[in-house]
Amino acid sequence: MGEMISKLKPVAHGNHESKPILDRDGPERDRDTPYVSINGNENNYVPYVEIESRSSITCPTCHGTGKIPKDQRKELVALIPYSDQRLQPRRTKQYVSLAVVICLLISSLAIFFLFPRSIVVTHAGLNSSVVAFDTTSPSINLSTTNVLNISNQNFHGVDVTRLDVEVLLVATVIGKSSTNNVTTMGPLGNSQIYYTVNNTIKDNTTYNICTWSKIKVHNVLLHIQGTVTCSYLGHSEQLSFNGYQYVDCRSNTTIPHSL
């Protein structure tokens, strides 16, 4: 009996020494990390290096090269860790506030410069006149050249596209005139427009006053009214004006003069 026990001890002892303490093919193997950081900085994410081990496999999309085919760029989704700095943009509020301020400033300047302002049209007076008598009618042919002042108070140019004028003696229209494409005015500019109206007076009383040599003063009061059509920024606007002026109907001509 004692001899059999002495024979079993070496066998048991040998089997115990030949068995490894930890199974190298067990869970310890599965805890191998397939990725390592090149510089050891957790905040900097760089291309990984795959460690070849029995528990690691080749990337099915990039085939271990770290690159994916171009035709799969719209199919694959990249996972970014929550702590990645790209998910935490800096100074977002400052950038948004600056963009809002710039937009408001540009809008304010655009409204200030493009906001339509008034265009002032005034009758300046008579520049010259030519008088001719028709004894057969009898009638007076009176050609007057008048001056119109236009002031542009806008920060953009204005085109004066049309000028319509009519001249009245008391309540009777004695002459009309229409002119197209009159002038173009620059920003904050002023302009003078000279226009001529051919009038015909067929009133006998006025004819006798103008031809009577015993009277020293031969003036007739003319009422001038009209409209000016202006175009700017795709918008058309009509401006009216009127004025009164005395014209000597006895003299043959009135010398042109500046106003």
Image: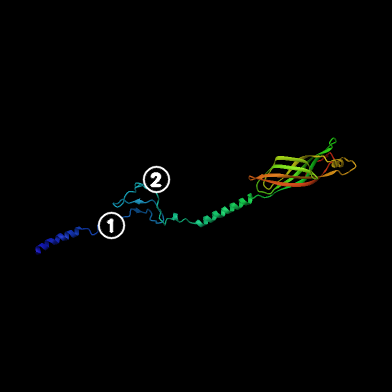
Q: Which mark is residue 73?
A: none
C-alpha span from label 1 to label 2: 35 Å
CA neighbours of label 2 inside 10 A, class few (<14), some (14 to 19), many (20+) = few
Residue type (three-letter) at the residue carrying disc 1? Pro
Q: Which mark is residue 27?
A: 1
Q: Quadrant of residue 165?
A: top right
Q: Tag count in the figure?
A: 2
The quadrant the N terminus occupies is: bottom left
| Residue 142 placement (x, y as % from top left) | 81, 39
Q: Earlier in the sequence, mark 1 or mark 2?
A: 1
User: What residue is shown at x 29% (from left), y 55% (from top)?
Assistant: 30
User: What residue is shown at x 56% (from left), y 53% (from top)?
Assistant: 103
Q: Is residue 208 left or right of residue 71?
A: right
Q: Quadrant of residue 87?
A: bottom left
Q: Which mark is residue 72?
A: 2
Work out whether 162 lies above or below 103: above
Residue type (three-letter) at the residue carrying disc 2? Gln
| Residue 108 placement (x, y as % from top left) | 60, 53
Q: Quadrant of residue 97?
A: bottom right
Instruction: Tell me, yes or no, if residue 259 can be seen here.
Output: no
Q: In the current view of this chain or complex, which residue is farthest to the bottom?
A: 2
CA neighbours of label 1 inside 10 A, class few (<14), some (14 to 19), many (20+) = few
Q: How is the image coloured?
A: rainbow
